[in-house]
Amino acid sequence: MTEPVSRDCEGGCACRHVRYRLSPPPLIVHCCHCRWCQRESGAAFALNALIESDRLQLLSGHADLVTTPSASGKGQRIARCPVCRVALWSHYAGSGDRVSFVRVGTFDEPDRFPPDVHIYTESKQPWVVLPPGARAFSQYYKSREVWSAQSLERREALQR
Ligand SMILES: [Zn+2]
Ligand SMILES: [Zn+2]
């Protein structure tokens, strides 16, 4: 990587009511190929950067949290712009409000955060061809085996 990943990253919705800033690096970037993400995005997969919610700062506007069914059955809360309704991030039951799954496509510079791991590839649309060597799991994975030591430490800190 040629640029420091620690540089702040801004983003927002389509109508610019909601603007946010986050402090990278993300804990991990998921490319999720599950059917639920396909339905919710209307596309082939969802790209989410996981980050501690206290590293995600709202610069303007506010987001509505919309409860939405999820694959686990426990639901997720999707933060959407109240004006244009674009989805910006989600909270899942597992990690709760302390972790935000930020939609990479809403970053001003989405190219900075390619996926670290592909999940639920069992339902990957067949035309999506993963790059050689990409980390991929047919369903989910064990964080301990995939996350960097720093990210695992940050997660530990969240649970204290
Ligand atoms: Zn908007
Ligand atoms: Zn998914």
Image (spheres, rainbow, N blue to C red):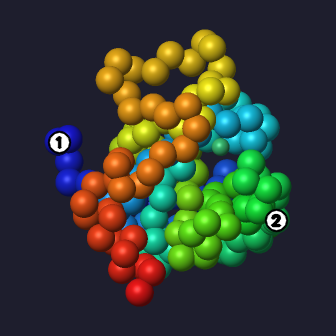
SS state under label 2: strand
Residue 139: give x, y in percent of width and height.
58, 38
x and y percentages locating residue 104 in the rendered image: 52, 48
Q: Residue furthest top?
A: 127
* Circle nearer the N terminus (2, 1): 1
* Side (left or right) of 145 relative to 20: left
Q: Which amino acid, by three-letter code, is at mark 1? A: Thr
Q: Is residue 92 left or right of residue 30?
A: right
In the rendered image, which quarter contains the C terminus? bottom left
In the rendered view, would you say 157 is above or below 42? below
Front residue of this view, candidates 60 and 56:
56
> Going by the picture, which residue comes out furthest to the bottom?
160
- From this viewpoint, which residue is outermost toward the left? 2
Q: How packed is label 2: few (under 14 Cα within 10 Å), some, or many (20 or more)? A: few
Q: Position of residue 14 (x, y in %)?
A: 67, 51
- Which one is in front, 11 or 36? 36
Answer with left or right where residue 97 lies relative to residue 134: right
Please name the residue shown 54% across and 49% down the image: 48
Mark 2, ligand 2, within 8 Å: the answer is: no
Q: Is residue 125 visible?
A: yes
Q: Residue at x 36, y 56 (%)?
A: 144
Which residue carries the number 1 mark?
2
> Is the N terminus in the top left, top right, bottom left or bottom right quadrant?
top left
Q: Which residue is mark 2?
A: 67
Q: Nearer the viewer, residue 60 or 139?
A: 139
Question: Can the viewer see residue 80 in this picture?
Answer: no
Whether the residue carrying mark 1 lies under 8 Å from ligand 2 is answered with no
Badge 1 density bin: few <14, some 14–19, many ≥20, Cα 10 Å: few
